[in-house]
Structure formats: structure tokens, C-alpha cells
Image (spheres, rainbow, N blue to C red):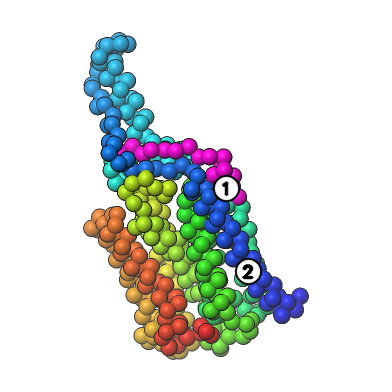
Amino acid sequence: MSAEQLAGLSDLTVVAAVLLYVLGMVAFATELAFGRYNAGRRAGRAAPRPAARQPVTVGAAEAGTPAAESVEAGAAGEIAEAGESWETGETGETGESVETGEPPAVREASPLAARAGTLALALGWLGWAANLAAIVTRGLAVGRWPWGNMYEFVVAICFAAVSAFLLTQLRHNVRFLGAFVMVTAALGLGLAVKVFYTAAGPVVPALNSYWIAIHVTAAIVASGLLTMAGVAGVLYLLRGDGMSRLPAREDLERVAHRAIVFAFPLWTFAVIAGALWADRAWGRYWGWDPKEVWSFITWVAYAAYLHARVTAGWRGKAATVVQLVAFGCLMFNLIGVNIFITGLHSYADV
């Protein structure tokens, strides 16, 4: 195929990825609407607490005696406290609502939810494949690494965010994030097509370097993981204390924290690699260019989040707010700086 044909195929597969992500979002939302859910305190009703166990000497209690009944009540309390996790029916660590300390109410998933969940994952993987095909064909069309402008960069970040979600789903049940990750990726690709689109072609000389494969790739992978963490953080703040289709806030916070733990070293490496590339391209490691400054601000913000959790023991809403402030810095660094601020990294071609 010619370069023009490959570029056209890349554009078509981006549109296909948008459609598949939107359909996947609908399927994930259907599963979320009709699947199991954990509920907090019901209005006007307090869930009974399990009876406390009494110490009993082995062999001293017989069936029907008060001591034996106390042991049985304690065992039943342990089973009640175990609870079930969102949608899977697996035993959780405590099964208690983070907000109320009460055992969660669990509603059985309908057959529609099970079919929608299977379809959603299939659509997610098909959209992921179309997104990957768009990146590969774009790279073949231009004969270089396909993230030399804002259009290519945003397409790659959407791919990284969906990859982070789908690969995490292979080991942990995080389908409750599916609808929100899919809609984020669809909106990102739509923004890339409508606002950032740049025809396939060569890039400025400074980008013709093997460092683009090192520095930008690390930034893209880290940004995908941090985007998934940002989605979980937003859902944490939106989730109410009452009945909800979303999982417990504790689960949302755990997903966000683990994603950031993986992404932070990658972002650190991206900043260091960027400094090394700047030395080769411009003869200095650091020049206070707007992109360099905001990359460092983003690094400091995520470092503050991790530091607050480890040393000060921040959890819950406070830690989530810090994480979302850092995510805002990331988004401004990736998009806002390229559009609104002129500098050596102004390769947006918008």
C-alpha cells in the first residue's frame, strides 16, 4: 500500500475505534445498571451487627446449650461480615461499607448484565485493536514513530489508557471502570480528529531522533495509567454514601493508588529522558521551557500524593483531591501547554 492509502486507513481505523469505544461504553453501562451493587445505610434502617463470640472451652458445649448457640452466632457473624465483592460474588476482605461500617446489600446480577459484560469486554478489545491499527498504519505511512504532533500523541494516550484498563481487568475485576474509561477514550479520539488532526507528513528536525521512542513512549504509557487513576478518582468523589451502582470508595481508591504507583517511575524516567534529549537537541539539560516546567510540576504533584499516603497516612477524600490536582496538572501539561503557551515543545500543529 502507498503512504496515502496507509494514512487513509489510519484515519478510518481511528473512527472505527471511536464507534467501538462508544458501543463498549453502552454495554459497560448496561452491566453497571443491572449488575450487583453494594449499598450503604438504607434510609431509616440500620443493619444488625453480628453477635459477639464468647470464649468456650473445646468440648465443653453441647448442641442446644447457650454456649454452643453463642459459638454458632459468632460463626454466622463472620460469614455475614465476609460479604461479596462487586459483581463477581467473590468473598471480600471485610464486606463492610466504608462509609457506614455496615454489611453491604448485594443484589443479584441479571442475565442481561452478564451478557452485557461479556459483550462490553469484546467491544473494548475490538476498539483497542482498531486504535492500535490506527497507530501502526500511521507510523508506516509517515515512516517514523507516530507521535510527532498533538493528533498522534492524543491517539496514543487514548490507546494507553484503554490498554491499562484491559490489562488490569485480566488480573482484577475492574469492569466497573469500563464505561468511564471507554467514554474518556472516545472523547479523546473525537477531540483528536476534530481539533488536533494533522495530515500525515514529516516532523520538525528536532523530533527526528531515537529519543522520541524512549522519552515520548514512557510519557504515553505513564499518562495512560494516570488517566485510569484520574477516572477512578473522579468516581470516588461522585459516589454517594447511600445506595450506589459503583463499588465502595475503598476499591476505587485502591485502583487509583496502584495505577499511580506503576506510573510514577515511568513519568520520572520520561522527565529524565527528556532532559537527556534536550541536551542532544539544544545543548542544555534544562532551560525552563513551559513543557519542562509543567512536566516537573506534574512530577511534584504526584510525588506529594505518594508522600502524603506513605508518611502522613492520608487516605480517602483528602488523598483523592491531591491526586486529582496532580491529574489536572498532567492534562494541562499534555494539552494546554501545547495549545496556549509557545515554547520549544510547540509541535501541536493545531
Q: Is residue 80 left or right of residue 28?
A: left
Q: Marks 2 and 1: in contact by CB < 8 Å?
A: no
Residue 313 x %, y %: 25, 55
Query: Which of the pair 15/243 is nearer the observer?
Result: 243
- Residue that badge 2 annotates: 15
Q: Residue at x 28, y 31 (%)?
A: 48
Q: Is residue 120 left or right of residue 72?
A: right
Query: Which of the pair 290/213 is nearer the observer?
Result: 290
Residue 103 x %, y %: 33, 37
Residue 322 x %, y %: 30, 64
Is residue 261 among the parts visible in the rendering?
A: no
Q: Nearer the N terminus, badge 1 or badge 2?
A: 2
Q: Which mark is residue 151?
A: none
Is residue 203 among the parts visible in the rendering?
A: yes
CA–CA distance between discs 1 and 2? Answer: 23 Å
**Is 210 drawn above or below residue 81 in the view shown?**
below
Q: Is residue 298 left or right of residue 153?
A: left
Q: Is residue 9 left or right of residue 159?
A: right
Tag 2: residue type?
A: Val
Residue 73 x %, y %: 30, 22
- Residue that badge 1 annotates: 116
Tag 1: residue type?
A: Ala
Q: Which residues are magenta?
A: 102-119
